[in-house]
Amino acid sequence: MINNIKKVVIIGGGPAGMMAAIRASQLVKNVILVEKNTVLGEKLLLSGNGRCNLTNSETLESFLKGYAGSGNFLRDVCKVFFNNDLIEFFGSRKLPLITERDGKIFPKTNSASSVRDVLENELGNNNVKIIFNTEVTDILVQNKKVKAVCFRNGSQLKVDCLIISTGGVTYSSTGSDGEGMRIVERLGHTIVSLRPGLVPLLTDKKYPAALNGLSLKQVRVVFTFDRKKITSNIGDLLFTRNGISGPLILSISGQIVNLLQKDIAISAFIDLIPLQSIKEVEAILMNELRLAINSSFNDYSLFFCL
């Protein structure tokens, strides 16, 4: 079937769009990538605080648990191309990656721009044509087949195959404003209700405001509800003006949001020393008390506050 395709058009120049264009260009000569911004990968440059958290070292099963419905909708895709494949992709293009203690994988350069550079170079090496500063407003369908994409300036671009990679609705200033989903919905596709996936969590309690900016390293959070619990990995947590955030919370927030949307009451408990048993913690406390036996209360009260 691929032999009958003469032109592939990809809408959206984020990481997914660039990867799709790279792969398509290995199979078809005429590949066009359409981006409404003046540059590619604007949101990519923001990821991982500018460092770009590319993937993680988790197993497929563990990775999919972070998605609704255990991520079954991603299973077949990930079986074809998963974290090891991504590591090989960038490694073979002279961008080594590093795995941090929490399993997150970053470029060794610690710069998201180096990731974009590799993708842009690969687009050029494969002769992908890029159209910048051009917004798609509609898709022309005839006899149940996509025939062309329509641009805001009134022009059209004929296609044999169309890939839509316009992203979600986060950081609309980078181009992810949901327009792609609105277009396909008009064409009859069903859009699953959107919900946050990587977000801070708000709390009913007001005391986090007093801790705003406080970061806790290597902790674990246990969320309890209806006599059940969800236990996070070990990582870093950040208190905000009205709740909790940080890498640890962001990575598990999708599961919690799914429960909150069902009006399920949830409590969160922070385990400050998750790698040690209760007996080990008791031993640490007793040792600290012995060391501080001749100190004033103020000298060692900070220990208990932590």
Image (cartoon, rainbow, N blue to C red):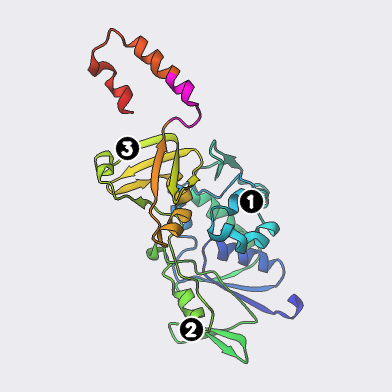
Tell which circle, 2 or 3, labels the residue nearer the N-terminal end.
Answer: 2
In this rendering, would 152 be left or right of 158?
left
- Residue 139 appears at what percent x and percent y? 53, 83
Residue at the spot of label 1: 61
- Residues rendered magenta in the picture: 273-282
- Residue placed farthest to the bottom in the image? 143
Tell which circle, 3 or 1, labels the residue nearer the N-terminal end.
Answer: 1
* Quarter placement of the C terminus: top left
Residue at the spot of label 2: 186
- The residue type indicated by label 1 comes to Glu
- The residue type indicated by label 3 comes to Leu
- Residue 63 appears at what percent x and percent y? 59, 51
**Is label 3 in a helix, a strand or a loop?**
loop
Q: Nearer the viewer, residue 293 or 176?
A: 293
Image: 154 above or below 268: below
* Mark 2 surroundings within 10 Å by alpha-carbon count, few (fewer than 14), some (14 through 19), many (20 or more): few
In this rendering, would 197 be left or right of 119?
left
Can residue 218 be seen at all in this image of the molecule?
A: yes
Residue at the spot of label 3: 214
In the rendered image, residue 274 lying in the magenta stretch gets the answer yes
